[in-house]
Image (tube, rainbow, N blue to C red):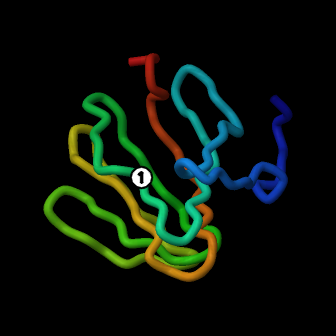
Amino acid sequence: MAPVTNYRAHTGAREDKHYKTTLFEGNHLMVGVNCLEPGQEQSVHTHDSADKVYIVMEGEGLFTIGEETHVAGEGSVVWAPAGVPHGVRNDGEERLTLLVGIAPPPGKH
C-alpha cells in the first residue's frame, strides 16, 4: 500500500450492499472508505475490542451510536467506542462517502 493516496480514487458502488475498501492497514489501525448509495445502510453492529471513527467526506447519513441517532453531513466526525452498537443509513439523494478508521483492526486484537 502506498503511504499517500486520494480517497476519491477508491470510491465505488455495489447494487447488493454498500461498497467498502481498505486504504491502509497496520497492526494498530485500519483506514478504509465506505460508500453508501441512496437507500443503502450498514446494519447496526459492534466491535467489542475496537473503536471506530467515521469521517463524512461527501453526502449526509443517519448514524446510530448506541441508543442515539444523529444526522451527520460533510465534515462531520462520528465516533463509536468499542462495544457500542453502531451503524449508518443513507436516506439522502446522493452518495454518502465515509472515511472509516478502526483501531485496532478487526482480527488484530
Position of 56 relative to 79 (above/below): below
Left or right, residue 35 beside residue 87: right
Q: Residue 73 location, x and y as percent?
A: 50, 79
Crowding around mark 1 (Cα neighbors within 10 Å: few <14, some 14 to 19, many 20+) is: some
Residue lying farthest to the bottom in this orientation: 93
Q: Which percent across, then down, holds residue 40?
A: 48, 61
Kindly identify the residue that appears in the image at 44 percent across and 17 percent down.
Answer: 107
Residue bearing the label numbered 1: 42
Residue projecting furthest to the front = 16
In this view, 105 is above or below 34: above
The answer to whether 28 appears left or right of 11 in the picture is: left
Q: Nearer the viewer, residue 100 or 37?
A: 37
Quadrant in the picture for residue 82 = top left
Secondary structure of residue under mark 1 = strand
Residue at position x 61%, y 49% from top?
19
Give the image location of residue 79, x and y in percent: 37, 57
> Going 18% across and 56% down the picture, which residue do you hit?
66
Locate residue 86 relative to residue 34 in the image: left or right: left
Disc 1 residue type (three-letter)? Gln
Using the rendered view, name the quadrant where residue 2 is placed. top right
Q: From the top left corner, tell me how far across and down residue 7 is, in percent.
A: 76, 55
Q: Specify the farthest residue to the left.
A: 67
Residue 37 figure quarter: bottom right
Quarter of the image that includes the N terminus: top right
- In the image, 48 versus 13, the foreground residue is 13
On-image quarter of the C terminus: top left
Which residue sits at x=55%, y=52%? 18
Q: Number of labelled discs?
A: 1
